[in-house]
Amino acid sequence: MKKVLTMAILSLIVFLGACSMESPFVNNDSESDGKVKIGLSISTLNNPFFVSLRDAIVEDAESKGMEIVVVNAQDDAATEISGIEDLIQQGVDILLINPTDSAAVSSAVQSANNAEIPVITIDRSADKGEVETLITSDNVAGGEMAANFIIETVGEGAKVAEIEGIAGASATRERGEGFHNIADESLDIVASQPADFDRTKGLTVMENTLQGSGDIQAVFAHNDEMALGAIEAIKAAGKDIIVVGFDGVEDALNSVEAGDLTATIAQQPGLMGQEAVSAVERVLNGEELEELIKVPLELVQ
């Protein structure tokens, strides 16, 4: 009887010890325990627009008690996919993705779908995979605004160069679509080349364009960074050409005020970021979102 009682006590001790062991799957950090964990993949932090977008998301999310992990794709599709896969492995509750390439990011979105992690895209869409919503400006309308402004400023039939963004990005397609909706009928587009949303590449493309078509009267660049690069090339060539950008970043607004950049179709990255965090809350509360949440644009000249 004594032996049986001893064995029972030992078994109880082992059981209680096992109960007190910390599970490797439980986060006991009091600062993060119970918080919503957001994964944010940003296309690049070399562009001030996306820095503002990231900052707005992080500030709003943290003010609401959420944890956020940010990965930078550095405008590279492979880096973007790797970063998103890492966020999935970390077990984030929801993913915010600002795609570098709308086609390439699709596999990462599908991976999140398989892991049952909701996905929200920002500024650019994903071609495939299930997404709760896309938060973006009306890029088609913005492209049309740019074309109409050029017509009003230099007249119909003016010779225009278009500097395009990254070929696979939905923003490139949509801004180009809007621009061509108007320009194909009313302007003479003498050159259209990509510069990947990059200022240095915008300068190079503009230099090459001026060598081939020196009588250009206007330029539409799919973002401000490329527009500012184009202005450098135009100044160096001693030309008087109007330039219209897209985004409304601080450098561009300062350039408009200085009389260098003629105009920019201004987005609102701060508001876009707030809309993204609001969408996170709604998705995690089980609400269905509209497929597209549009953030207003403004012509600044």
Image: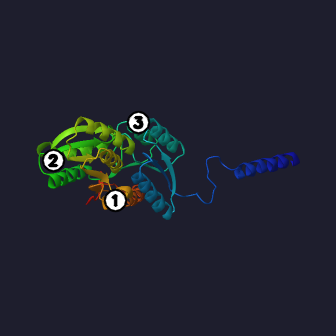
Q: Secondary structure at mark 2?
A: helix
Instruction: Please state, as top left, top right, bottom left or bottom right, where the C terminus lies in the image.
Output: bottom left
Look at 50% across and 50% down and name the residue there.
70
Q: Nearer the viewer, residue 9 or 277?
A: 277
Residue 295 placement (x, y as % from top left): 30, 58
Amino acid type of the residue that numbered disc 3 sits on in the rendered structure: Ser
Looking at the image, residue 7 sits to the left or right of residue 258; the answer is right
User: Label 3, on which residue?
Assistant: 107
User: Label 2, on which residue?
Assistant: 182
Q: Nearer the viewer, residue 231 or 181?
A: 231
Q: Secondary structure at mark 3?
A: helix
Looking at the image, residue 207 sits to the left or right of residue 214; the answer is right
- Does the residue at mark 2 contact the one at mark 3 (Cβ under 8 Å)? no
As drawn, the label of residue 216 is none
- Circle 2: is it few (<14), some (14-19), or many (20+) Cα within 10 Å? some
Amino acid type of the residue that numbered disc 1 sits on in the rendered structure: Leu
Q: Nearer the viewer, mark 1 or mark 3?
A: 1
Q: Is residue 17 visible?
A: yes
Amino acid type of the residue that numbered disc 2 sits on in the rendered structure: Ile
